[in-house]
Amino acid sequence: MLGRPDQIRSDNGPQYSATEFTNFCKKWGITHTTSSPHYPQSNGFIERQIRTVKSCIKKCIKARVSISQALLNIRATPVDNKLPSLAEMLFGRTIATLLPSRKGDADDNVKHRLMQRNATMKHQYDAHARKDPLPPLYQGQEVRVLDDSTKTWTPGKVITQCPEPRSYVVETSSGASLRRNGRHLREAHPPPSSTTSQSDTPQITDDTTQECPVTKTEVPRWDWTHFSATEPL
C-alpha cells in the first residue's frame, strides 16, 4: 500500500475490531466501513479478489512456484480488454513480468471505462434481482428479522439506520442488537382486527334464560275427499 487511504472497506472479521486496528485508523484519519453481516454481495469485489488470491496460492503450492511471482502476474494482468492492469493504473505504465504481454495503446479515460463497466454489471444484476425492494424503514418500526441459524423470521424493531445503503441496526425479541441488510428484513404486518366487538356479543349468565325464536312452518294437508278408494293415487 502506497500512501494513506481515505477509506478502508472490509467484512466484519474480528481482526478489524481489534484495538490496534481501531487506533491505527484514528491516527491516520482513515474511515473504516464494513459490509452488512451475512450479506457478502455488498462486498462482492473484495470477496472475488480474495477467492482469486486463494486459488493462486493453492496452485503455487501444488506447482511449487513462488507466491510473489503469482501475485506479480495478477497485478500485471489487465482487468479486461478495455481496462489496464492494476499496476498500470497505479504507476501509469506497464510493469515487466515473465509472461508475454501485448503493448496496447494508452487510454487516459480509465475512470470513464470503470464507471461504464460497473454500470453494465449493475444492469445485468438488476435484470435478475428482486423486483420489489424493501421500502425505507424508520426508527421504531416493527419488522421481521431472518435468523440465519434456523432460517426463520423472528420479530424485531428498527433501532437506527447505518450509513451504508439498505443497512439497519435492529433489536430482536431477545434483546440482542444486530446489524442486518434490507434483504434480511421484512415489514411486520399487524394482526387482523376482529369485526365483532365484545359489546355486540350477548352475555349469557346462569340467571338469564335466552329464548331462541322458533319459526313455525305450516305443513300442507291433503284433502282426501276428492279421491276414492278404487282410484290409484
Image (spheres, rainbow, N blue to C red):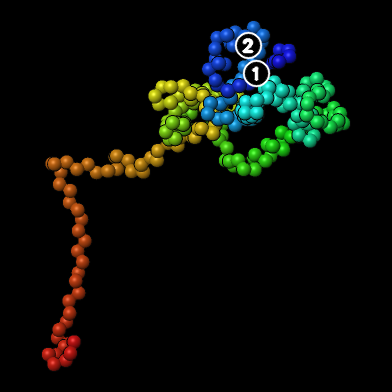
Drawn side of residue 113 relative to residue 30, left or right? right
> How many numbered discs sit on the rendered protein?
2
Residue sitting at x 13%, y 92%: 230
Q: Position of residue 170 (x, y in %)?
A: 48, 25
Q: In which quadrant will I find the C terminus? A: bottom left
Classify residue 125 by image quadrant: top right
Residue 233 in sight here? yes
For the residues labelled 1 and 2, the Cα–Cα distance comes to 9 Å
Q: In which quadrant will I find the N terminus? A: top right
Q: Nearer the viewer, residue 92 or 96?
A: 96
Q: Position of residue 3 (x, y in %)?
A: 73, 12
From this view, report whether residue 158 is shown above or below residue 27: below
Q: Position of residue 218 (x, y in %)?
A: 19, 69
Residue 46 in sight here? no
Classify residue 205 by image quadrant: top left
Q: Find residue 8 and name its label.
A: 1
| Mark 1 touches mark 2? (CB < 8 Å) | yes
Q: Residue furthest bottom?
A: 230
Q: Residue furthest front?
A: 64
Q: Residues within 10 Å of mark 1 (few under 14, many from 20)?
A: few
From this view, report whether residue 233 is shown above or below residue 153: below
Drawn side of residue 64 relative to residue 37, left or right? right
Residue type, label 2: Cys
Mark 2, residue position: 25
Q: Secondary structure at mark 2?
A: helix
Residue type, label 1: Ile
Q: Nearer the viewer, residue 129 or 173?
A: 129
Residue sitting at x 14%, y 90%: 228
